[in-house]
Amino acid sequence: MSQKVLLTSKEVNIILHRLACQLIENHLDFSHTVLIGIQPRGTYLANRVKAILENDYQIKDVQLGFLDITFFRDDFRRGEKQLEANKTQIDFLVEDKKVVFIDDVLFTGRSINAALTAVQSFGRPSEVELLVLIDRRFSRHLPIQPDYRGRQVDAINDEKVIVSWKEKDGEDAVYLV
Amino acid sequence: MSELSVNHLLGIKYLQKQDIDLIFETADHFKEVINRPIKKVPSLRDITIANIFFENSTRTKLSFELAQKRLSADVISFSAAQSSVKKGETLIDTVNNILSMKVDMVVMRHANPGAAYFLSQNVKASIINAGDGAHEHPTQGLLDSYSIRERLGEVGGKKVVIVGDILHSRVALSNIYALQMQGAEVKVCGPKTLIPKYIESLGVTVEPNLRKALEWCDVANMLRVQNERMDVNYFPSTREYAQQYGVDKALLDSLHKEIIIMHPGPINRGVEITSDVADSQQSVILDQVENGVAIRMAVIYLLASKIQQ
């Protein structure tokens, strides 16, 4: 199968810094903001963003949680593959907080739709934003758009966008397969 | 593996070790869910489940109902006492009538061993056995192992003694299968009249002396004396039973190590265990009840995902 590099390690790094700066622009000291990585693949991006905010921009105590949406998905019993659950770890209430969802690829928007339902179990956020590394244009099933996007990609439906992370896959890169 | 090897939960005997691991992993997630401010997920909103109880039950029935509601399934419950079963309807007819109302899954308790298996062969629905006579009570077996795993880290290599009325107990059999499958060692302890004749063929040993059994074990699962199933006298008096096979605080404190006390409920306080034992730090009885909901959510979720749409 042919694969094309969409983003190299260097480009991913630049984009992550830009996304972090855009977050700071809107959220300043993050005292009323919480970051929530969407399980499973959004957690790597969320950890990176948090690390950049803390190490490079000296923002202390950024609250980060991970949300698993398996039990909230609308394709239970529809797919051929059984859904596998991951850990939800949100040790704070999101009541009246600004929530930023973080995921690697925005495709149909159904995961984010499920996440919007799932996060209500932890309180009523004052607002919810979405940060994604890759935004696949023209593929949405729902009216959901990112507030912060790393790179916009036009890909046909049978193509797959694969984001690999150093901590999991050995390198930072984005491929179109 | 992310799928159960079975389409029904009829007994632990029909499961494999990987199934138990999968159920436990899924239950971990649901345990987190039921400790959230909003304890509900929408996964099973298109599934309808019938709870059919031909025998009395408090804990199991409530626990199943709660698990189903936490998963957003539609639930209908039915007790045989108020039903047409009394008018002479057969089991298959009763269940088929319920199924024609578009029910996807049946949770059944019945006094006859094998009733759940019989149903699974004859009706088109996913069946969960909630206790069939003195045969099996698989969700109880699973939640007992799950509670041991939670307290001690793992089940493999642990020593468990099941004390009391083994003869009439479906909990005992499901526990024996579940524990052995996960690599635990099992002994049973109780009056000779209440130990089944061929119990050793299951690979468990019999220890008639309670103190010796407790000194040996890491976990003691205290079963209830099932007076309602006893057609003859199996021991001279309840008082004598309590003296020989009841656990009190003094006995527990005199042991060389701290053991865990379990009880599937309902407790006859002062018979199998005294109140101070039931309410002590070593007792995990209420954890068992909480874990029951998580385990049942996991079982229902995993079986529901195998129902064809």
Image: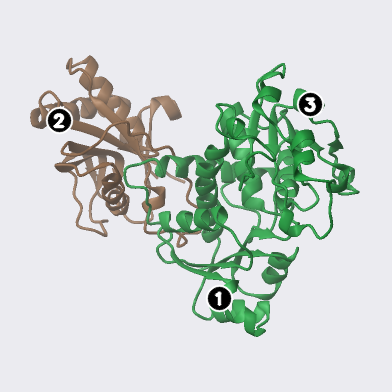
In brown, which chain? A
Circles 2 and 1: CB distance less than 8 Å?
A: no
**In the displayed structure, would residue B160 be above or below residue A1?**
above
Quarter of the image with the C terminus of chain A in it: top left
To the question of a shared chain for discs 2 and 3, the answer is no
Q: Is residue B235 left or right of residue A56?
A: right
In the depicted structure, whether residue A133 falls above or below residue B257:
below
Mark 3 or 1, nearer chain start: 1
Up the image or down, B32 lies above or below B134; here it is above
Q: Which mark is residue B82?
A: 1
Q: Amino acid at mark 1?
A: Gln
Q: Chain of mark 3?
A: B
Q: Amino acid at mark 2?
A: His
Q: In front: B163, or B41?
A: B163
Image point (77%, 53%), residue name: B168
Does residue B121 appear left or right of residue A153 in this picture? right
Residue labelled with disc 2: A32
Which residue position holds label 3?
Answer: B211
